[in-house]
Image (cartoon, rainbow, N blue to C red):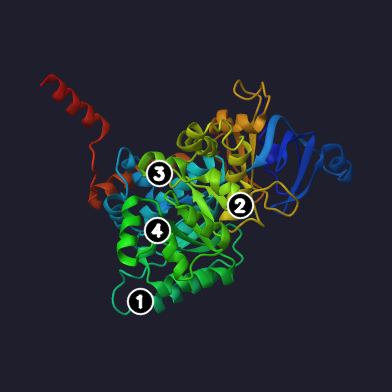
Amino acid sequence: MNRLDRAPLTGQGPLLLAPDAVLLPEGPTDGYAVLVDDGLFQAVGPAAQLAGAHPGLDAVRLPGHLLMPGFVDAHHHLTQSFGAALAFGEPSEIFRRVWVPLEGALDEESAYTAAKLASFEALRGGFTTVTDAGTRAGVDVDVVASAARDAGIRCVLGLVCNDTDREPGSGPRAVLDDAEKHLARYDGDPLVHPSLAVSIPEAATEPTLRDTARLAAEAGAVVQIHVNEHLAGVERSLLRHGLRPLEHLHRVGALGPQLLAAHATMLTPRELALLADTGAAVSYNPVASAWKGNAVAAATDMTERGIRVGLGTDGTRGDGFRLAEAAEFAQRLAYGLTTGDSSCGAGWTWLEHATRGGAGAVGLGGRTGTVAPGRAADFLLVDIDTPELALSWDLPWELVRRGNRDQITAVFVAGRLRMWHGRPTDWDGDALVRRAAELARAAVTGAGVVRAHPTSTEARARHERTVIL
């Protein structure tokens, strides 16, 4: 294993980085270097060529390391980090019993701390971008923006535009006014990119679904909507509209390239065709399916149909390598085993969806997700001189199957070193964790969370009592 010197990576001027390999869209390429300056990749090419073109720069050698794009989390709930473990062993649609009351119990400090804690975990796991689907906490959404910005992570920030449960006098017009202000609020922000969000289609009126789609499309932003995630939601839509949720969105004019459909686990062939025909994108959240879902999204089928797909954690665990592995693993169990598909995307598919594809799905395809000139220098230095990766025959597959966050030496966002061996470089991560633990106890205790199952310790005790009896 190769230990790097941190000092040459912390300078303010141009950085000429020469790792053993660079992960490009076509695959890992040996002997390449990158020039980073002003937050961007300025040049990418053969190391000798870049060194000759920039004789005044000393190349920073990175032996035993791969330089690769940072992971993009296409679906997160940053202010839910205090209750992540409350989802263990719970049935579907826990948002009604867990997330709504928990976020409702947050004040400004606890919402900020929860969001920064989630950002910390994401950075440690190699995510350089997180996509927040909007908070239900009764605070200004800029609290979440500040937390992400202070942590040093890029954030696609959703503003919840639900209007079916608003008080009289604060209906669709007020929602759209807030949406327009939100889309303009972060114009020019280097790390925060605004988006709109609707929790589920039934949470917004038809005019609001249609108008948020229009506003987002005009602004080049996305609208995040949880779509066809759980059987109960599909059935409610059928009873209310005679249509499944995605069909309902199509009927009201809310499908299009601006839509980021979260989960999309229960789609008919017709609904898959609607996604492909309208250019909508999907956040495939495999860990969420395993922990609290009804089904696994048909992501391999979506890929073959040309549907844009990103990978999302849904706030489950912030490890980009484990997310990519879960994406492949879930497809293999849900679809590959029954069809004899032993490849299930051949490894590269899931790296693609975790990086460049994810950036495209969340509306940042022209900004991040790829090591290329002009793109944001959001990247990882991954130690590949380890027992897991050193004997490489097929590095993309091995990154998916055997990669882990403990192999990430450094995380850069917008050209700045943000994490070094899992620790923040310019703020106190330990102090944040301690404060989060204090605030989380108070928030969860006062939230009125209702769980369907006991804790694992209590469940074991009940099991033992039953066995004895």
How many residues crowd mark 3 within 10 Å: few (<14), some (14–19), many (20+)? many
User: Mark 1 is on which residue type?
Assistant: Gly
Which residue is labeled 4 in the image? 135
Which residue is labeled 2 in the image? 306
Tag nearer the camera, 4 or 1: 1
Q: Secondary structure at mark 1?
A: loop
How far is disc 2 from disc 1 in space, using C-alphas? Answer: 37 Å
Earlier residue among tags 4 and 2: 4
Give the number of marks.
4
User: Mark 4 is on which residue type?
Assistant: Thr
How many residues crowd mark 2 within 10 Å: few (<14), some (14–19), many (20+)? few
User: Mark 3 is on which residue type?
Assistant: Ala
Residue 186: x %, y % from top left: 55, 66
Tag nearer the camera, 4 or 2: 2
Q: Secondary structure at mark 2?
A: loop
Which residue is labeled 3 in the image? 295
Residue 284: x %, y % from top left: 49, 47
Depth check, front residue: 291 or 98: 291
- The residue located at (34%, 51%) in the rendering is 231
Please tell me whether residue 251 is drawn above or below residue 351 in the rendered image.
Answer: below
Q: Quadrant of the N terminus?
A: top right
Depth check, front residue: 459 or 43: 459
Q: Quadrant of the C terminus?
A: top left
How far is disc 4 from disc 1 in space, using C-alphas? Answer: 19 Å
Residue 221: x %, y % from top left: 56, 64
Q: Secondary structure at mark 4?
A: loop
Which residue is labeled 1 in the image? 171
Earlier residue among tags 4 and 3: 4
